[in-house]
Image: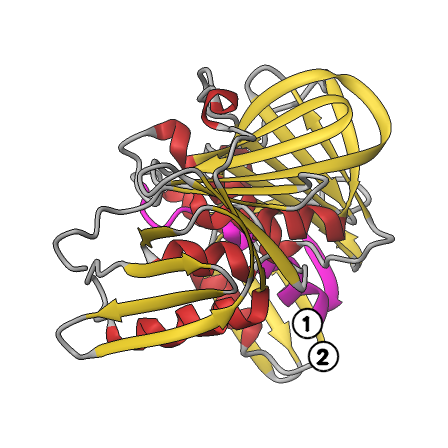
Amino acid sequence: MKIICSKSNLVKGVGIVSKAVPSKTTMPILECILIDASMNVIKLTANDMELGIETRIEGEILEHGIIALNAKIFSEIVRKLPDNDVVIEVGNDNQTLITCEKAKFTIAAQSGEDFSYLPAIEKEDSITISEFTLKEVIRQTIFSIADNDTNKMMSGELFEIHDNLLKVVSLDGHRISIRNIELKNSYGSRKVIVPGKTLQEISKIIGGESEAEVEISFTQNHVVFEFGNTLVVSRLIEGEYFRIDQMLSSDYETKVTVNKRELLDCIDRATLLIKEGDKKPIIINIADGSMELKIKSQIGSMDEEIIISKEGRDLLIGFNPKFLIDALRVIEDEQVDLYFMNAKAPCFIKDEQQSYIYLILPVNFNAVA
């Protein structure tokens, strides 16, 4: 095999597929990036058996072939090469020569035939969505997946399609994030659970242009994202997702409308008094025309009032401040509506169209009030 491509194209391609290289594995071949120039296109592939990424890069193929190079060594070499054309040539015993200007590296490689290729996917259903929308949906929900694997379902997000609506749901046992997206076309009904890791990596790769589109295809066990020159294949999480509709309610005793930026900044200031790992709640006292926010910790205390519009009863309630901050940060609206039932029931932050719904469970603050 012998190929020539620009350093910039190579760096970009390696950066994309490296996201599917496992940090720990007992299979050395999975620590590699596959360079496939066996046909008339140069493809880079990485695969950790749960997530696989393939991307095409521009370049010239002088001799067809296929080779697997250690991802860590290869990416470090490529990154530090001069900004010029790079020649990759495979000699005897899979010794690979990487040349750029006067820099020459020779590294051992593995046979491309031993590489674990991406599974051949027979697409059953697919939807199309803009890169911008997908990137935003991930940003607005990914923070409330569980960050451990004690419950596999909570480490993924529900993608539910019905007619021209896509609902994306994440939860971690303390909060739920929901985004409802209107699609351009109607599709058959489908429910799948996409691993959070897959979505986080896709969010880093896609550019986020509103004109560029992503095709998302589903099979029984896999989801495929296709955009630009890149293909991402991921296993789905098996099982039945939580019945969140039973947790959602339109009833409320108190409704608060508040400037989002003011509320977010106030809670953010309050967290200055909380050490990492400390679970001090923020206490919110809702009365006519104002919302008082208090926090008390070993470092000190803070007390601040915000002007609000209120319907219904007065209320004293406590929350983990991080959960409120996470939700408020991803809402674009200038004013937000918060709905409460009582001090032990969840708070809902949602817009009138319910394009977003954030459910946050309160905390018992009697010990610290």
Asked if 220 appears above or below 325 in the picture, the reply is above
> Within the magenta stretch, is there residue 11?
yes
Residue 175 at what x, y percent from top left?
41, 41
Is residue 20 visible from the viewing direction of this image?
A: no
Circle 2 residues within 10 Å: few <14, some 14–19, many ≥20: few
Q: Is residue 143 left or right of residue 362?
A: right
Residue at 74 percent of width and 64 percent of height: 4
Q: Position of residue 313 (x, y in %)?
A: 45, 46
Pick whichever, 327 or 127, lies toward us.
327
Along the horizontal axis of the image, is 304 left or right of 94? left
Q: Which residue appears at 66% of the width and 60% of the height? A: 332
Q: Which residues are magenta?
A: 1-25
**Which residue is label 1 attached to?**
7
Compared with residue 341, is residue 269 higher up or lower down, i.e. above or below? below
Q: Which mark is residue 84?
A: 2
Q: Quadrant of residue 52?
A: top right
- From the viewer's side, name the closer residue of 99 and 24: 24
Sequence-first disc among 1 and 2: 1
Q: Secondary structure at mark 2?
A: loop
Image quadrant holding the C terminus, namely bottom left
Local SS, label 1: helix
Which amino acid does the dot numbered 1 rest on? Lys
Q: Residues within 10 Å of mark 1 (few under 14, many from 20)?
A: many
* Residues at marks 1 and 2 touching, judged by CB atoms closer than 8 Å: yes
In screen coordinates, is 151 left or right of 241?
left
What amino acid type should be assigned to the residue bearing mark 2? Asn
